[in-house]
Each structure stands twice: as C-alpha cells, then as structure tokens.
Image (tube, grey):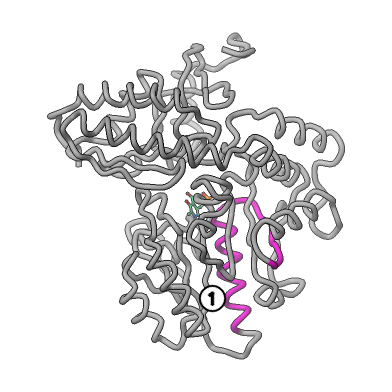
Amino acid sequence: MEGNNMENSMSLMEAQKKEREWLLHTYRRFPVLFVEGRGTKLWDDRGKEYLDMAAGLGTCVLGHAHPSVAKAVSEVVFRLQHVCNLYYTEPQLRLAEELVSRSFPGKVFLCNSGTEANEAAIKLVRKYMRVRGEERYVIVSALRSFHGRTLGSLAATGQPDKAVPFSPLPQGFIHVPFNDLGAMEEALRDPRVSAVMLEPIQGEAGVYPASQEYLHGVAELCRERGALLVLDEVQTGMGRTGELFAWQRYGVRPDVMTLAKGLANGLPIGAVVASVEVAQAMAPGDHGSTFGGNPVTCAAALATLRTLQEEDLLENASRVGDHMRRRLWEVSQSLGAGFEVRGAGLMLALEVEGMDAWEVALRCLARGLVVNPVGPQTLRFLPPLCLSREEVDVAAGILAAVLEEMKGSEVAS
Ligand SMILES: Cc1ncc(COP(=O)(O)O)c(C=O)c1O
C-alpha cells in the first residue's frame, strides 16, 4: 500500500459497528473499508489491493488521487475555500467558459450533484416557457431512467418503485418506454409538453444505449413541437463513452445538458449548460446554491478537463473500452453462456443471466476486483478512463473464474 498509516486506520468491523450506530441505513454496503486509492487501484484497511471497475460510481475519471486534481485543490484550499455567489471568484468563471467552449454556445449554472443539476434544468425549462407566455410545464422522460433522488428529479425518474414511498411527487411528468419513437411522438402531442429529458445511455438501469435513430428522432420531434431537449449527461459525460459528452457520439446537440459525477474527478459538483436562448429565462433570485461554483471544486473540475486532454483519456476510453467489450463477450462465450454485453467506451454492462449479480460482485471483491451490480443479474463497469488493456485482461480473468465457480447456482431474485 502506498503511504497509508495502518495504525490510524479503523478496522472493517469497527466501521460496520459505527455504521449501524450512527448512519441512516440508506445503503447496502460491501464488506470492505477502503483507505487509499491511486489510479485504477484501491487498498483496504488491511493493505489488500483491488482493481477498481466502479471508480466511485463513475466519478474518478482520471483515476484515484490524481496529482493534477490534488495540486489544483490544495493550491485553492490554502487560499480561498469559499465565499458564495454574492461575489465573483475566478475558478467558477473559468470553468463556465471551459464547459461552454467544449459543448455549445450557452451559459452555465453550477451546483453540487447530479440531482441538483437536473432540478435546475427542470426549473429552467419551466421558467423558459413561462417567460414566453406558454402554459407548458410537462416534462417527458423515459421509463427505467434515473435522474436523481430529490423530489423533482425523482419525479422525472422513470422507476416508480423508487418514488412511491415518497408521494406525492411534483406534478408535470410523463414517462414513456425508452427507444420507442412512436410512444415519444404520442406523448409530444400533449400541448403542455415543455421538454424531453433523456439519458443518452441509461446508466443506473443497467447501461441501455439510446439508438441513433431514436435520439435523432426525438430531437426532430422536439424541434417540430417547440419542446426543449434536455440530455442528462451526469453519468455519460466527461469522456466516459469516448467523447467528452455522449451527445457528440450521436451528433445530437441538446438545448440543455446536465453534468456531475466525473466533472471534478470525484469531488461533489454539478453543472447545467443551457443554450443562450434558454439561459436568458433565468433572472437573479430564480435559482441558487450556497456551495454551487465553490472555488475548490471548480478548480478540481478545471484540472480534470485539462488532464483528460493532456493524457488523451477519451481516446483511451474508446480503445480500451472496445477491448473490454470483446473480453467480456469472450468470458461469456467461454462459459457457453452468450450473456449480453452493452454500452460504449468505458461504460459497460454484462448480464449474468441465472446468477445473482451481488454475489458475483462479492466473489470478485474477494479476488481483488471491484465491480458494481446494478440489477439482480446485471453488472456495471465504470472504471477510471486511464484503465489499460492489461488491466482489462486481469479483470476478465477474475470474472471468468468467479462465473465458472457460480455456474449453475440459484438466481437470488
Ligand atoms: C444519469 C444520472 N442522473 C442523475 C444522477 C444523480 O446524481 P447524484 O447522485 O450526483 O445526485 C445519476 C446518479 O447516478 C445518474 O446516473
């Protein structure tokens, strides 16, 4: 392990006890206490090394503890930790300029998470229509989508089981099947529709990409009906699919894009980029955030954007992602299984049909591989974008051994 002071570390058992005692039980956790990370590697409290294919749920795009981010953060943190948005600070202005120059002409709102970015997008869409004097407030999103857990984003999320215990949710959301252009066309007949909100690749649902025809078709329908297209790039953004933003793969430019996860390589930040016309709808007092645009996280985001380019990580995500897709498919073939592999770049999923994905992930962990189960039989891979082909081969070897061991075991649910 690189430099960890073991004597100061809490043990896993202590951590589990403290969690039971002090934390709301909102997470099902794996039995591991991570104390250090570097690049694609993590170390636990006992010094055991892991290859990380989850990267903080897709946030650590540059890899853990990247020196460029650490340096940028420490420079700012010793100078100015926070002042709020009543005043100007340099990193947020530079970040806004950078995001616009890498996406489309527009303006930026900065916040602290993906769900907040989507909340801001929802308010922006409503205000835009209000300013134009149009009574249009309904947002159409997709079934199985995930847009966050605050009430507005939860209302946009197309997974009723996540929302039902918290009803009533805000009104004005319609859900249609994903990749079904006919259903979208039907929904857009409703004159109250203001926008369509979609993930270019549904991540949390298990990595389901929109088809080219679908995304182009939806954009065309939005144009015809005067509705806005909001793309949620919280998970697909920041190079994950081999382009900085997934809409660039499709050649479909949104009116509004939301970002978070990888934007500051694991530090909490969110952003909305809105076209110039849409952005004009917002006025002082309409929206805000105490921490949004904080100098430390913005400096981290600037360092992340710069390093993605300097280290050619988009190209790496694309190349190593293709290799990984192939290797996952080969693993499945070697078991005689024909499991489905989905995704783009380094955002991939493997259906482990007939097996319990949580159990697969547990056994991978025991062998030093971190993978993320996102459904009863679905494993998701969101590794750092600096992953190498050799590391893919190591991961494939571990996965093959675990799946072979589990062949024929019962499905949990
Ligand atoms: C596409 C998408 N949107 C929004 C969110 C919510 O982001 P956060 O957890 O930062 O609020 C997520 C999180 O997984 C996501 O994948």
10 Å neighbourhood of mark 1: few (<14), some, or many (≥20)?
many
The location of residue 351, given as percent across then percent down, is 26, 42
Residue that label 1 marks = 228
State the residue in front, 407 or 129.
407
SS label for mark 1: strand
Q: Is residue 77 above or below residue 305?
A: above
State the residue in front, 36 or 402.
402
Q: Image check: 405 left or right of 6?
A: left
Residue 218 position by quadrant: bottom left
Q: Image check: 273 left or right of 30?
A: right
The location of residue 217, given as percent across then percent down, is 41, 73
Task: Determine the residue positioned at 55% across, 32% down.
Answer: 386
Asked whether mark 1 and ligand 1 are closer than 8 Å, the reply comes as no
The location of residue 396, given as percent across then percent down, is 34, 26
The residue type indicated by label 1 comes to Leu
Q: Which residues are magenta?
A: 105-129
The location of residue 266, given as percent across then percent down, is 60, 39
Name the dominant secondary structure of the magenta segment: helix
Q: Is residue 270 above or below residue 406?
A: below
Q: Image check: 120 left or right of 240?
A: right
